[in-house]
Amino acid sequence: MPRAKRWTMVKPSAHGIWVVRLSKWRYFHDFVHQQMLDFTNHVWRGQRCDDHELESSLDRELRGKGPHVRKRVIAEHMESFKYAVRGRRGPNPIPLLDENEWWALGQHHGLITPLLDWTTSPFVALYFAFEKKKVPQTRYRAVFALSRDSVEKISAEIRGKHRGLDRPRIVEFIRPLTDDNPRLVNQGGLFSRAPDASTIEDWMRENVSEDITGGMYIKLLIPDSDRLECLRTLNRMNINHLTLFPDLYGASAFCNTALGIEKY
């Protein structure tokens, strides 16, 4: 009996987008090793469900609002946050020089922002795809890989042609250098910011040729049924809440996970 394929292309590549379905979670390592090992500038993101595009929490919150309302609400939200954190960043806090640094600070502490979390590690992204157990759950978990170099090259071209005062329709990557976020360091973390009211997929379809070779954006579908085996294996690789969240929250979350998974 022939061996089942380790992975299959779900649909033809378009606008640089691949959607690949793995038959087992364990083939994730094979895919990374065989297809991605030489591509050092992709960033990775894991999501619990496979039926959502890459949309920020702020865009979800403001979905359906017109551009003028969005602009006002976002400005008020940022101003409110700046006042709310006064006196709460410890003694002699490092100045935050631009809007994206303020959004990054808020993202770390649970603020609704226009940012998305990414990591430089495909296996950290895999952990975040599988760590939560909620209902409803899709049949597959999703791990995304995005070529940072390709996105930044296209965004630089868009920025060069932009003549307005508003933010151009670019995707930015934000990697704060401040020392007050050990989680970001342990997770190999960074953030992206897409155009307002747009998903990463919207931006790809808008700016990448329809017939371009795929691989700029890769969505890997991994069976949800493999969750326990995946998490147990990642724990043996020292990828867990204890290492990714070096604080009391991480310690508690690690113990909660171990409580729910036999032989974790």
Image (tube, grey):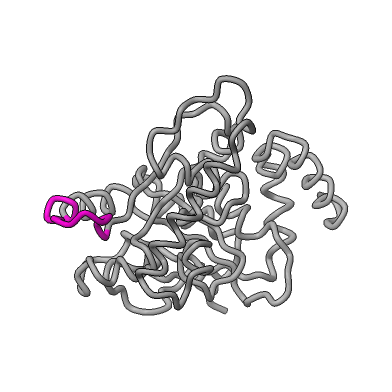
Residue, x 28% and y 56% (percent of image)? 170
Residue 17 locus on image (x, y percent): 33, 68
Residue, x 53% and y 62% (percent of image)? 57
- Horizontal side of 156 relative to 28 (left or right) equals left
- Horizontal side of 145 relative to 163 (left or right) equals right
Is residue 125 visible in the rendered structure shown here? Answer: yes
Q: Is residue 248 above or below residue 4?
A: above
Residue 182 lies in the magenta stretch: no
First to last magenta residue range: 158-169
Q: Main secondary structure of the magenta part?
A: loop
Residue, x 52% and y 42% (percent of image)? 82
Q: Residue furthest top?
A: 92
Residue 176 locus on image (x, y percent): 45, 35
Residue, x 40% and y 44% (percent of image)? 99
- Horizontal side of 117 relative to 175 (left or right) equals right
Q: Is residue 32 above or below residue 49?
A: above
Residue 1 locus on image (x, y percent): 57, 79
- Horizontal side of 57 relative to 206 (left or right) equals right
Is residue 120 visible in the rendered structure shown here? Answer: no
Query: Which residue occupies the foreground of this view, 74 or 142?
Result: 74
Query: Which residue occupies the foreground of this view, 192 or 216?
Result: 192
Q: Is residue 130 above or below residue 174?
A: below
Query: Which residue occupies the foreground of this view, 81 or 105?
Result: 81
Quadrant of the rendered image containing residue 179: top right
